[in-house]
């Protein structure tokens, strides 16, 4: 690629960062890293009615949590939203005067016009078109107004918008990096509003002009914008600008192939992080929704994915969001975490109960977790004693008398061990199983009463893991209570 690669992620501050938004941001980040380019964060906040307070901070925090940081553009430092870079401002509403100037230039060139149609008239036109089973589009009622008359009406305060004057005949041929050649007849393209009645630009004008001003080389965005591409390319053409290359990402789908939406589960990145999905696992999973660089791997670092990234290899069809696959992948990432890092993540996420036994329990449940949020329940199962009856201590067809003999033997065996012995689960298991063989007993009839004595449960971690959690004194105290029940 001859010119520098400059890509942008340009969300609207209307709430949280959607999983689909994370994928868009990731693919842009991959493109920039693959080609030594720049990744920009631009916030498109010109739809003033849909703004949500704190949304910019939330979006930025989610990106940073996933380590998808912009090289330039919008940054949030100490709660302050700032624009950093030579092509700012990156908050779109602060570029309003530039957008208006471009709109007036389009009018001067004869490619845009003032429209004074009221909301009521537009609704009536749309209603009639629906009744006649026609495409719902602006009927171009104001397209041929005298520019001078229209300017005079606008000057005296008549409410108006500015619309793009698209060609009425022929078609436009477009190249999409994912879909290839796309042709759309101009008859299907509306005279799009460029400047709204409140004086703010629509996405179509603002995004196009900002992409030019910020020297964006590639636009990677959602599939919903493909139908708008003719208008955007037309603006580039009539302004005499070089257009970026475009790629429109297919939809993310629920298991039933419907569009991924909050009605069927979480769609916000922050919701997944709060549940204890690791950011690196979420990034790995989302990156492979509709694209996989190899056929024999599922686990990649973000940097590996950037090195292998090829936007032309992204599937054209929608990608199903498979939560079972995400769960599996997250479990693999948790297993791979160094223990100290794992404990730190539990603590930061609020999933780490206080206490020495709780920390030991956290260590033994590590490889059983799918999400970090499961840790408190599993830790509690490993630490707390459940109420149980003496009969629960008896293994299958064994007898209470045999169970008592085995538990008494185990008590003496455990009592003879040093404190250091309780710090190594593997050693405890190997030596205890050897001891059981030496005694001529069976694993089931010996370890079952010991495990129930230590946990009070018929389903629990192994007795070796439980003794690692409790330590010597507590283990002996629990065994003594069990023996008292059998007396």
Image (cartoon, rainbow, N blue to C red):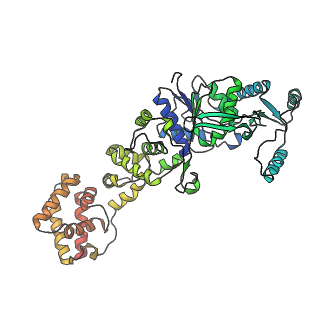
Kindly indicate the quadrant of the structure image that contains residue 440. Answer: bottom left
User: Along the horizontal axis of the image, is 222 left or right of 455?
Assistant: right
Residue 374 x/y as whole percent: 41, 56
- Compared to 191, does 333 lie above or below? below
Residue 10 seen anywhere in this rendered image of the structure: yes
User: Along the horizontal axis of the image, is 186 left or right of 437?
Assistant: right
The quarter of the picture where the C terminus appears is bottom left
Instruction: Please tell me which residue is depicted at 85% across the width and 39% down the height of the picture.
Output: 141
Observer-nearest of 351 and 354: 351
Observer-nearest of 486 and 301: 301
Residue 267 seen anywhere in this rendered image of the structure: no
Observer-nearest of 12 and 346: 12
- Compared to 167, does 222 lie above or below? below
Residue 221 x/y as whole percent: 58, 38
Residue 235 x/y as whole percent: 70, 29
- Compared to 444, does 29 lie above or below? above
Residue 250 x/y as whole percent: 56, 44
Observer-nearest of 435 and 359: 435
User: Along the horizontal axis of the image, is 165 left or right of 380?
Assistant: right
- Compared to 331, does 58 lie above or below? above
């Amino acid at each position: 690629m001859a010119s520098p690669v400059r890509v942008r992620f340009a969300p609207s501050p209307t709430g949280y960062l959607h999983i689909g938004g994370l994928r868009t941001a990731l693919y842009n980040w991959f493109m920039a890293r693959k080609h030594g380019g720049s990744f920009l964060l631009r916030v498109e906040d010109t739809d003033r009615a849909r703004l949500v307070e704190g949304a910019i901070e939330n979006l930025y925090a989610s990106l940073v949590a996933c380590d998808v940081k912009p090289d330039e553009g919008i940054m949030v430092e100490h709660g302050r939203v700032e624009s950093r870079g030579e092509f700012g401002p990156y908050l779109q509403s602060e570029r309003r005067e530039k957008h208006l100037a471009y709109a007036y230039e389009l009018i001067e060139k004869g490619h845009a016009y003032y429209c004074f149609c009221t909301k009521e008239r537009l609704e009536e036109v749309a209603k009639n078109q629906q009744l006649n089973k026609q495409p719902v589009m602006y009927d171009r009622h104001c397209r041929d107004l005298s520019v001078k008359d229209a300017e005079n009406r606008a000057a005296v305060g008549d409410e108006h918008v500015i619309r793009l004057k698209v060609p009425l005949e022929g078609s436009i041929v477009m190249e999409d990096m994912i879909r290839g050649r796309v042709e759309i007849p101009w008859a299907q393209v509306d005279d799009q509003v460029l400047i709204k009645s409140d004086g703010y630009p629509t996405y179509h004008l603002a995004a196009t002009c900002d992409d030019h001003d910020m020297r964006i080389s590639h636009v990677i965005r959602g599939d919903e914008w493909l139908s708008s591409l003719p208008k955007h390319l037309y603006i580039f053409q009539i302004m005499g600008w070089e257009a970026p290359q475009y790629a429109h990402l297919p939809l993310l789908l629920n298991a039933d192939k419907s569009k991924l939406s909050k009605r069927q589960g979480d769609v916000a990145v922050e919701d997944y992080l709060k549940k204890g999905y690791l950011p690196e696992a979420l990034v790995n999973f989302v990156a492979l929704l509709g694209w996989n660089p190899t056929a024999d791997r599922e686990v990649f670092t973000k940097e590996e994915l950037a090195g292998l990234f090829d936007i032309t290899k992204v599937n054209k069809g929608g990608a199903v969001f498979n939560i079972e696959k995400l769960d599996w992948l997250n479990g693999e990432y948790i297993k791979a975490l160094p223990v100290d890092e794992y404990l730190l993540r539990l603590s930061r996420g609020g999933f780490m109960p206080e206490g020495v036994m709780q920390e030991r329990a956290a260590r033994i449940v590590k490889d059983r977790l799918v999400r970090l949020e499961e840790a408190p329940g599993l830790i509690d199962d490993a630490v707390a004693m459940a109420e149980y009856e003496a009969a629960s201590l008896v293994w299958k067809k064994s007898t209470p008398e045999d169970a008592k003999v085995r538990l008494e033997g185990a008590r003496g065996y455990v009592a003879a061990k040093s404190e250091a012995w309780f710090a190594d689960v593997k050693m405890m298991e190997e030596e205890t199983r050897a001891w059981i063989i030496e005694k001529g007993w069976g694993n089931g009839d010996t370890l079952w009463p010991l495990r129930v004595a230590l946990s009070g449960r018929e389903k629990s971690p192994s007795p070796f893991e439980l003794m690692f959690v409790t330590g010597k004194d507590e283990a002996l105290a629990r065994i003594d209570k069990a023996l008292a029940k059998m007396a």
